[in-house]
């Protein structure tokens, strides 16, 4: 009986945590969409396809999925130099956008969960804060 009760509480706790995080992620994605529209849409376009050889795509982006920390760092501090996205080489500059860590987490959650991308886990403010130059 004790095992049953312990198991029950463990399952309920895990389920509660999952549902809370799912709601938190959804709210972050909604805020991130607004930030994307204000700061990113000009170069990466409404559907995240970017401009070939100039601004890399965010849609179905192998770079984003395989380089999470570097992607966050690029949004936080800007990015310069070559990177390869979906087999195409890009060599341009993205200036720092002046976003707060929470805004960076939100926009990353939006991008990582849009246009065919599926982020494995939510980007948190703590994760963004831990990334330095």
Image (cartoon, helix red, strand yellow):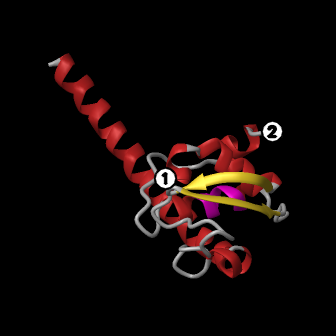
Vertical relation: 31 (above or below) 42:
above
Residue 88 counted in the magenta span:
no
Q: Would you say residue 1 is visible in this rendering? A: yes
Of 29 and 22, nearer the camera is 29
Q: Residues within 10 Å of mark 2 (few under 14, many from 20)?
A: few
Residue at image mark 1? 62
Q: Is residue 101 visible?
A: no
The label number, if any, that marks residue 16 in the structure image: none
Q: Is residue 19 above or below residue 39?
A: above
Q: Judge whether 108 appears above or below 45 on screen.
A: above
Question: In the image shown, does 36 or 5 lie closer to the viewer?
Answer: 36
Residue 26 against residue 65 in the figure, above or below: below
Q: Which residue is mark 2?
A: 132
Q: CA distance from mark 1 to mark 2?
A: 23 Å
Q: Residue at x 70, y 58 (%)?
A: 104
Mark 1 closeness class: few <14, some 14–19, many ≥20 residues within 10 Å: some
Between residues 33 and 49, which one lies in front from this camera angle?
49
From the top left corner, tell me how far across and down residue 37 is, in percent: 65, 80
Kindly identify the residue that appears in the image at 23 percent across and 32 percent down.
8
> Which quarter of the rendering shows the N terminus?
top left
Q: Residue 95 appears at what percent x and percent y?
A: 84, 63
Instruction: Using residue 133 as the reference point, say whether residue 39 is left or right of it.
Output: left
Residue 34, percent from left and from top? 64, 77
Place residue 116 in its image quadrant. Answer: bottom left
Whichever of labels 1 and 2 marks the residue nearer the N terminus, that label is 1
In what element is the residue under mark 1? helix
> Residue 124 at what x, y percent from top left?
62, 47
The tally of labels here is: 2
Identify the magenta region.
Answer: 103-108
Q: Main secondary structure of the magenta part?
A: helix
């Amino acid at each position: 009986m004790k095992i049953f009760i312990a198991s029950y509480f463990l399952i309920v706790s895990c389920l509660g945590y999952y549902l809370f995080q799912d709601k938190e992620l959804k709210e972050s994605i909604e805020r991130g969409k607004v930030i994307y529209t204000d700061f990113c849409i000009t170069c990466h376009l409404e559907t995240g396809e970017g401009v070939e050889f100039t601004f890399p795509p965010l849609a179905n982006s192998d770079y984003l999925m395989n380089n999470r920390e570097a992607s966050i760092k690029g949004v936080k501090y800007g990015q310069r130099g070559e990177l390869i996205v979906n087999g195409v080489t890009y060599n341009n500059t993205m200036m720092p956008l002046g976003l707060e860590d929470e805004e960076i987490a939100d926009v990353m959650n939006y991008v990582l969960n849009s246009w065919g991308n599926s982020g494995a886990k939510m980007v948190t403010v703590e994760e963004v804060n831990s990334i330095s130059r």
